[in-house]
Image (spheres, coloured by chain):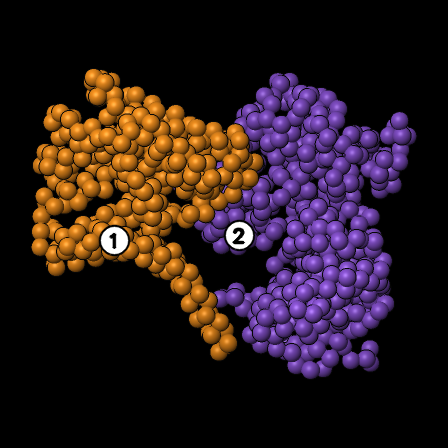
Chain colours: A orange, B purple
Amino acid sequence: MSKYLRWDTAVGILLIAVFLTGSGTTEGFADTGNLSSALNDTAEIALIALPMTLLVVAGQVDLSVASMLGLSSALAGSLWDAGWTFEMIVPVCLLVGVLGGLLNGWLVTRIGLPPLAVTIGTLTLYRGLASVVLGDKAVADFPEAYGKWAASTETVPGTFIPYPIALFIVLAVIAAVLLHSTGFGRSLYAIGAQEDAAHFAGIRVKRIKLALFAVSGLVASFAGIVYTLRYGSARADNGLGLELTVIASVLLGGVDFNGGKGTLGGAVAGVLLIGMLNNVLTLNDISGEIQVIVTGLLLITSVLTPRVVAVLSERRHRRAAAVS
Amino acid sequence: MTRSPVLAVRGLSKSFGAVRALTDVTLELHAGEAHALAGENGAGKSTLIKTLAGVHRPDAGAVRLDGEAADFGGPADARDAGIAVIYQEPTLFPDLSIAENIFMGRQPRRTLRRIDRTAVHDATAALMRRLGVPLDPERPARGLSIADQQIVEIAKALSFDARVLIMDEPTAALTGSETARLFSVVETLRAEGAAVLFISHRLEEIFRLCSKVTTLRDGRWIATDDVAGLTEDALVRRMVGRDLDELYPKQQATLGEVALSVRRLTREGVFRDVSFDVRRGEIVALAGLVGAGRSEVVQAVFGVDRADAGEVHVGGTKLRAASPTAAMDAGVALVPEDRRQRGLVMELSIERNIGLTGLGSLGSGGLIKRALERGRASDWATRLQLKYGKLSDSVEVLSGGNQQKVVLAKWLATEPTVLIVDEPTRGIDVGTKAEVHRLLSSLAAEGLAVLMVSSDLPEVLGMADRVLVMHEGRLAAEIPRAEATEESVMTAATGRNGKEAA
């Protein structure tokens, strides 16, 4: 926004401010137990936000991720009901995730449909398939041995970090390196900013988009398994509406919805900020409706602030010019 | 001249931050006069126009219209005062008709505020008659050529009773006959008493159309001359402030083996049966009218477009179809015609743009080393004498000529054996133009095969060892340098030669 303060840095600072305010005002917030559970509550959003950031930087978007999460959850539940072992279920779910992502990517790159339209369609399609697979029942008899890997009470020894978040940290580092330090990452910015110019520079635009959608589907289906284990319940409507929280977090982190701009660190800060705010509000007994409103206002502010700053500095320039 | 000017600019200055775009500029426009504004890119022409159009407010100095001080709060004020600007690329509403575009927002009304379509139609038809251009008022703007869109803009200016018509490089994208038509329209307006301010990089147009020329350099007024007593060399000297080396410094070519060989390349409905060779050390021009299929041919050669039939061989090896990556690996580079959409990613920095063609070679193990990226950029920036602030600046802030150098750098950095350039000097100033020509010539002398698409006839004749002429999707003629004249190329381009008759 201005040359002194980048938006993603501002979100980072805001994150620290919320953390400090939370620890100062809210009893129990800074306890390691609460932090573990607050972090773990954002696990699926955080995981899905990684490929989403890459997609949005490349000027794409995937709205079908929460439905894919639900489909993966429903599939896991129904296969478990049918007596499959978890070692068999996970690869099948992930495969379905990749195929779902490839379908999105195929429709976007081969048929040439806009990603927003394609993934609104598959959002409905995948959620529908989830209901076909599991109906409206819930499967909840998963064994403790698997559930503990996703629980916030089990942490990486010596830290307060639950395993899903530990995995997220590893993946976030990989995604950050990919986006900011490889030719692949440079290509994403070029595609997002000016697809034609990227194509003319010999960048394999279609192949890259296809890969992004496939990875998005893969991660969403994996998040479905995490979700299922974390709540110990497989349902077709798991994670309903989660895609909007993911996209809100990524945009809040300063990734431009028009593509070509943004950092992975900013997106991660956006995820943590929304997660932490929700946790603080919950601890203060503020209802879920209000939390949604707060998230919405924050998002609007994040989109609005750079504009306001731009307008103000333009005015200042004009006034300075008029004086001189 | 004793008459008082319609538009008088005195002591005009304008800065953007620390950059002084205009310093103490003076300009007088008289009724019935076509006045050229000359200067290199970055000389301040655009800023001056935008100030006259009410887009910028001057920091100092005055604009007087008919002797009265004019202070424009915005473009609408300038328009209402009778100043109309025709930009290089008109902005019409594509889904509205010509008539609707002209009267947008101020349609004549009937009772109940209904739009009086008959009146709109008749008024538009009258404007077209006045301009002597038979365009149907009901035609939608979509699908109009750029030339026709400009006519619509001019008609719109007329409907506002514009007394000052400013034209910013209107001919950059026009063919020869379209330019001639535009000039006759301008001539009509001038004869009716309008004052015309005309900007063009093509000097011959200034000499053809205008009676006076004002030259700007580095934001300052340099001279206002009568065109009649001026030579092209003298004008160029005023623009660049020094003697210019020859504009077309073609070196003698030593031809090597065939580097690029195109065989019976066809894309249905666009071009057909195109075959030619380009040898190492040779500059081959692909000439023809706009729409003859030249850009489409080179895009198919490079693989950004798919060809339906035919083959492309580079250095004796057949290229995989429709793959820019394969073409790049084989040593082909394409500098596309549309710099802003296809040549560059405007939001990205100079170094990132130059690095974009070498993402695999800028480090090890897939990771990019920023030092290598910057080194590649700074080497080429130096070699091409790029004028820039920092390599991390976005290419948006560069002038057109320097942007084109970035595109050239980005492609030369791939060390190609075949360089295809599509309109390499369109819209760039004479100084940079000469530099680009010198560069192409010396690259060819080093053994590069150069294929150059150009609509600039002097450039084609000045630079090419051989001229291929396309007409309506086919190769109509192949003319060696010695026989290439304006006439022989245009005859082939317009399909008037014998071969095409069959």
Identify which residue is drawn at 28% across, 36% down.
A237
**Quarter of the rendering containing residue B295:** top right
Q: Nearer the viewer, mark 1 or mark 2?
A: 1
- Residue B460 in sight from this viewpoint: no
The residue that disc 2 covers is B396
Residue in the picture at 67% in, 54% down:
B96
Instruction: Tally the marks.
Output: 2
Classify mark 1: residues with Cα within 10 Å, few (<14), some (14-19) or many (20+): few
> Which one is nearer the viewer's eye here, A198 or A257?
A257
Q: CA distance from mark 1 to mark 2?
A: 44 Å
List x then y, in percent, for residue B372. 42, 38
Residue B107: x and y in percent read 69, 65
* Secondary element at image label 2: helix
Pinpoint the chain carrying mark 1. A
Q: Mark 1 highlights which residue? A: A289
Whether residue A299 is visible, yes or no, is yes
Question: Residue A44 is drawn in which quadrant?
Answer: top left
Label 1 residue SS: helix
Q: Amino acid at mark 2?
A: Glu
Q: Position of residue B104 (x, y in %)?
A: 67, 62
Picture quadrant of residue B282: top right
